[in-house]
Amino acid sequence: MRCIALMNQKGGVGKTTTTVNLGAALAELGQRVCLVDLDPQAHLTINYGLDPTSDAVNLYNVLIEERSFLEAMYTFDANIVLVPSSIDLAAAEIELVSVLGRETILKERLKSAQHDFDFILIDCPPSLGLLTINALAVATEVIIPMQPHFLALQGVGKLLETVALVSRRMNPLLKVSGIVLTMFDSQTKLSNEVVNDLKGFIENAKGKPLPWANAKIFESKIRRNIKLAESPSFGQTILKYEPQSHGAADYRALAREVFAHNPSAIKPVASPIAASPVPAATPPAPAAVTHVAPKAASEKKVSVTTKPIEERKLVAAKVRIPPKPAPTPAPPVTPAEIEALT
Ligand SMILES: Nc1ncnc2c1ncn2[C@@H]1O[C@H](COP(=O)(O)OP(=O)(O)OP(=O)(O)O)[C@@H](O)[C@H]1O
Ligand SMILES: [Mg+2]
């Protein structure tokens, strides 16, 4: 199983759009996919037509109230399961402050659920706080959605520093699989300059004992496409909303590329700084995408709470976030804090 955190502390770069549509495209390839909404903004949840203010069991109940992960899984289509978020999740970072092992709660909960997915995609919030650290502690991979504008590289150093720390201290399996360029416009000189800068940066890491040593810039760039912005308000993925659009084509191409590029399957460089050895068992290299036989729904072993489509609240356009102010989020976990905790 591959567990991918879609991460970038910069807001509005396409994390949620990529989680939704990469997930849908992987499911279309016959992969069993679980999407986890780790963002209190709950955009992924809303994108799937669920109301984040409802009483449905959600990730907050799982992380804070120890409800089972399986209770919070809602099935969509044959191969897609969603674990929704709730605005309460904004308080989770504060509520978890005094909890022992607070960085690995998501990992523990996922471990205790008897699930059988090919991919888990985690939509991270736009911060490097405790929720994102929880995603990194359980993920095997990080994909960084990035908009190629002139501030794109700003913040990448901090992001990678956080990945490196978590990889070193908590999760030696963690690798950066790549950067996906979103809202891309190949016509602009700037986009191409940013791509070249990123390429140079990644080339520099090759052969080094860094989690991003085998990262790539995905060839499948996600073009700016208005259909991608429209589809959430219909509670649909781009593959359903506008299957012939550029957006659908780009996410289908990305899914094939992500499927074929599994950095965990690449032999790791021996790391003199690794705190604990990388486990010997690495997942086998994936077969070519064209050979993926779609799995019949009956083969699904995952046991989930199902919700008939008509029961779902298709409320994307109607969702009301209550006016009461959200609690002040906990400050991002600093590298020094992570060092001190582990
Ligand atoms: N390729 C695209 N073309 C056009 N619009 C896009 C594209 N990708 C994303 N958008 C739109 O850009 C906005 C931000 O995208 P998205 O919500 O996916 O970013 P995010 O990184 O998840 O944001 P946040 O950091 O707030 O969670 C949304 O309105 C989305 O519909
Ligand atoms: Mg988002």
Image: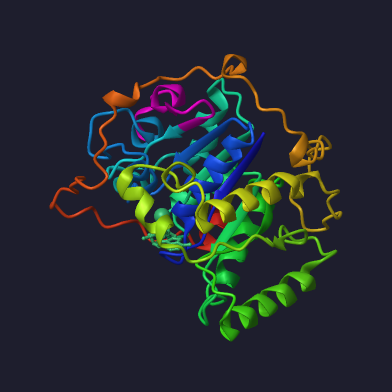
Q: Tell which residue pokes out farthest to the front in this image.
A: 244
Which image quarter has ligand 2?
bottom left
Front in this rendered view, residue 52 or 290: 290
Q: Position of residue 6 (x, y in %)?
A: 54, 52
In the image, is residue 8 above or below residue 257? below
Color encoding of the figure: rainbow
Residue positioned most to the bottom: 189
Does the image show residue 16? yes
Q: Which residues are magenta?
A: 64-81
Of residues 259 and 203, the one nearer the viewer is 259
62 and 253: which is toward the camera: 253
What's the residue at 57%, 28% (across, down)? 111
**Is residue 66 on the magenta stretch?**
yes
Q: For the point 49% across and 44% down, which residue is it? A: 239
**Residue 102: x, y in percent?**
47, 42
Q: Residue at x 68, y 49 (%)?
A: 258
Q: Tag count in the figure?
A: 0
Residue extending farthest left: 323
Give the position of the N terminus as an image quadrant.
top right
Look at the picture and state if 75 lies above or below 291: above
Residue 147 coordinates in the image, percent (x, y): 52, 70
| 230 drawn magenta | no
* Residue 176 placement: quadrant: bottom right
Horizontal side, residue 206 vs residue 247: left or right: right
In the rendered view, tell whether residue 267 sits above or below residue 1: below
Q: Is residue 262 left or right of residue 9?
A: right
Residue 68 location in percent, x, y?
A: 43, 23
Q: Would you say residue 174 is visible in this rendering? A: no
